[in-house]
Amino acid sequence: MNRCASLLVWIAPWVLTGCGEDSAGVTDAAPADVPGATDAPDAPDAPTAPALCEGYTLPAQQIPVQQPALVETSGIVSSRAHPGVLWAHNDSGDTARVFALGEDGAALGELALPVPLVDAEDIALAACPGAPASTPWCLWVADTGNNARDRDDLALVAVPEPAVSPLAALGQATAAQAWRFPVTYPDGLAIDSEALVVAGGQAYLFEKVDGASARVFSGALPTVDGAAIVLAEVATLASPGIAITRGRMITGADLHPLGGRVVLRVYTGIYEYRLPPGGTLTDLPAAERREVTLGPISEGQGEAVAYDARAGALWTMSEDPDGRLAQPLHRYACAP
């Protein structure tokens, strides 16, 4: 969503005291019970994944971002191949590019995409189409924003993740290869989606809707450039967040590196879903939902969320509602 009004100024300060465990006090499943989830990240040779957090520390650590072009951050993901690197992108109105950031907020360069983006809304890391051995990880960008519900050019775009590190910046680069897969919803439905998960050879897109429930759609990932991703409705999820205008719209998602957990972002909070052993994203309606935090009020238009690839933390970032200034990174560490 582009330049929508900030919501969180309406929320009283006492509301913004979310915790890592819900009011029922349900304890976390033992780590051995969770990694068996079917929807695990589907890329070869994944490094050691982070521990599963019991909860997350509040308030979040705020880290200034030194990339002035990131004024409308709509998606973020943590690199699994390159320690200390995050990838982020702007909402609509920017050129087709993604930015590399250090975990200290340093600008590590940008990667231009050789295909157009109309309204990029989320980013994920997963195997490249066909999983070529030379490029085991791809950045998957969801060009699926459809506020007016009048687009007929929705797509997922995949590009190989380039080498970058906090000690070796990327600079200005252009992806040498790209796949663009048109996205179609069942029965010609016009859906706005700003949250993407890629897992098990499937793409999952979460409906962004101002209501008590949201649909989840999924489709198999093609291997041939230009082939369509034909989505089907696979679940209906009770919308998390506060029941105020636009307060429960899902604006970002990520899958835990071990699988078994999904984090969802709405304008009024961050929520983690803990799937049953062996569960997939189609089981989200039955998953245990934990509130990470309400708000936070320091993110006036929060749209981006990601698990840390190694440290067992969460990363979030907001758009600037005025579209002028880069917003800080927020890091939620594992609770001790």
Image (cartoon, rainbow, N blue to C red):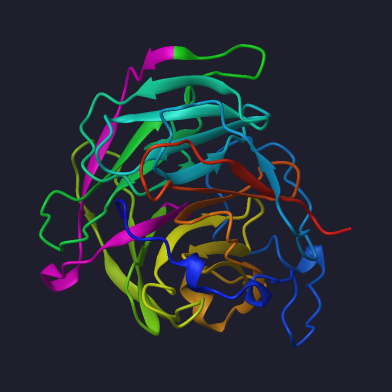
Residue in the foreground of this view, choosing between 121 and 274: 121
Quick check: 227 left or right of 172?
left
| Residue 168 x %, y % | 61, 11
Q: Quadrant of the C terminus?
A: bottom right
Q: Quadrant of the N terminus?
A: bottom left
Residue 203 in view (yes/no): no
Magenta residues, start to end: 172-201
Q: Residue furthest right?
A: 336
| Residue 172 x %, y % | 41, 13
Quick check: 251 left or right of 179?
right
| Residue 14 x %, y % | 68, 76
Q: Residue furthest bottom?
A: 24
Quick check: 186 left or right of 313?
left
Residue at point 45% right, 57% down? Answer: 252
Residue at point 45% right, 79% down? Answer: 239
Residue at point 27% right, 52% down? Answer: 144
In the image, residue 272 sits, relative to residue 130, either above or below, namely: below
In the image, residue 330 sits, relative to residue 241, either above or below, namely: above
Is 194 contained in the magenta span?
Answer: yes
Residue in the foreground of this view, choosing between 321 and 69: 321
In the image, residue 123 sits, relative to residue 302, either above or below, namely: above
